[in-house]
Amino acid sequence: MPEVDQSKEVKVEKVQEVEVEGKVEEVSEEWLDVLGSGDLKKKVIKPGIIDSRPVKGDTVTVRATGRLDDGKEVDIHDELTFTVGDSEVVLGLDMIVPLMDKGETAEVYIGARFAYGSKGLPPNIPPDTPLTYTIEILDSSPDVEPDSLPIPKRMSIGNRKRERGNWWFNREEYATAIQCYSAAVDYLDDATEEYGDEVRDEVKPLLVERLKALNNMGAAQIKVGAYDVALKSLEAVLRCQPNNVKALFRKGKALGLQGKFKDAVTILKSALELEPESRLIHQELARVREKAREEAESEKSLYRKMLGIKKEYLQEDQRYPVIKTFPWREWFALFVMLLVLLIAYKYRDLILGIFQ
C-alpha cells in the first residue's frame, strides 16, 4: 500500500468548528490530498467521533455510493463490511477508511489506479475511470483473534474473504487474491481439530470451507509462479480429501511447470480416473507427456555429444542395422582372395608346371 508523503505540505483551510461529543472537530471545505498526487483526496462532510479511527485489522461497516464524472451513481453499498488492510475492497477505500472517524461522512475522490483500474467494473464502470464516493462509517470494531469467535461467525468472515479472493482471481489479480485466501484460511482453521471422521459435527463445515480456500489459494499461487508453496497448499487439501479432482489437477500442473514430468503424469492420471470426461485434464496430461518426450530427446542428444556418437547412426541407421552396417566391401575382398587361393591350390601342379 502506498505511503502518505509526509514531506509535502497539504494546505487545508479551516472554515468552521463542530462540537462532537464534547470535543471540537475541525471541518475543512477544501480537499485533503492524501498522497500529494491528486489520486486520493478526502473532504469531510459530517465529522464523526474524535479519536475513533479504525486501524489495520479492524472490521468496519460503511455506507458508500460512487459517482462517475457525469454524476451517474455506481458501486452502491448500503452496508459494506470488510477488514481494513485485507484487500477486501479496492485499494482507495482500504487507504481512506483509516483516515475517517466512526460516524464520519466524507466525500472521497479515488483515481482509477486506486479504484477499478484498467479493467473497470463492467457494465457500469469503464476502464481507467476515477470515482468520487460519499462514504459514511457506520460501525467499526477492533481486531480479534479468530479462535475467540464462535464457529458461525468465523464461517461468515472466512467465506466473505474467500469469495473476495475469488473476485480478485477472476480479475487476474492473483497476488491480491492470495492475500484474501490466506486471511480466509486463518478464520476457517481450527488448531484443536484434525479433519477426519472424529471431528465434531459443528466443526466439519468450517474445515470443508477451509479446504476450498486452500485449493483456490493453490491455484492463485500457481498463477504467480510460486510452485513450491502452491504444492503445500494443495497437499494440505489432498491429505484430507485424497480424491479432490481440482486439487489433483492443480498439483499435476504445478509439478509439470516445475519440470517434474513423471510425477505430474502420475498425478494427472489419478485425476483422470476420477473424472475421465474432463477436457482440461486430458489437455494438461497431453501437454506434460509431450514435455516429457522432449526432455527425453534432449537427454539423448546430450549423451550423444558426451560419447561423440553421430545422431544419424543412432536414429536413422538403426532402422536398417543389418543392411547399412554390414561391411560388404571387406567381405567381398576376402571372398575373392579365398576363391583365388582355392583355385591356386586345386591347380597347383599345373601352375607349378607353367613356371618350371
Image (spheres, grey):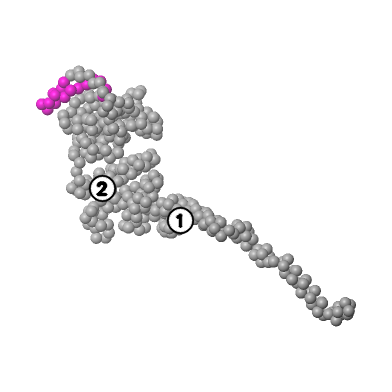
> Percent position (x, y) of residue 288?
47, 53
Residue nearer the viewer, 85 or 215: 85
Decide whether the magenta segment is chiefly helix, strand or loop: strand
* Circle nearer the N terminus (1, 2): 2
The secondary structure type at the circle numbered 2 is helix
Q: Is residue 83 above or below residue 192?
A: above
Task: Name the element at disc 1.
Answer: helix
Which image quadrant: the N terminus? top left
Is residue 197 visible to us here? yes
Residue 335, given in percent of the width and then of the height, sits at 75, 72
Give the residue at x 23% y 53%. 191
Label of residue 186 in the image: 2
Q: Is residue 301 left or right of residue 160?
A: right
- Image coordinates of residue 117 in percent, x first then y, are 37, 32
Name the residue rendered at 75%, 69% in the picture. Answer: 333
User: Where 314 falls versus 155 (above or below)?
Assistant: below
Which image quadrant for residue 44?
A: top left
Image quarter of the C terminus: bottom right
Q: Find the residue positioned furthest to the left.
A: 22
Q: Amino acid at mark 1?
A: Phe
Q: Is residue 210 left or right of residue 353?
A: left
Q: Height in image: 344 above or below 4?
A: below
- Across and down, in percent, residue 34 comes to 27, 27
Density class for disc 1 (Cα within 10 Å; few <14, some 14-19, many ≥20) is many
Q: Amino acid at mark 2?
A: Asp
> According to the image, label 1 marks what residue?
261
- Which span is picked out in magenta? 17-32
Q: Residue furthest bottom?
A: 349
Q: Residues within 10 Å of mark 2 (few under 14, many from 20)?
A: some
Magenta segment includes 28? yes
Q: Nearer the viewer, mark 1 or mark 2?
A: 1
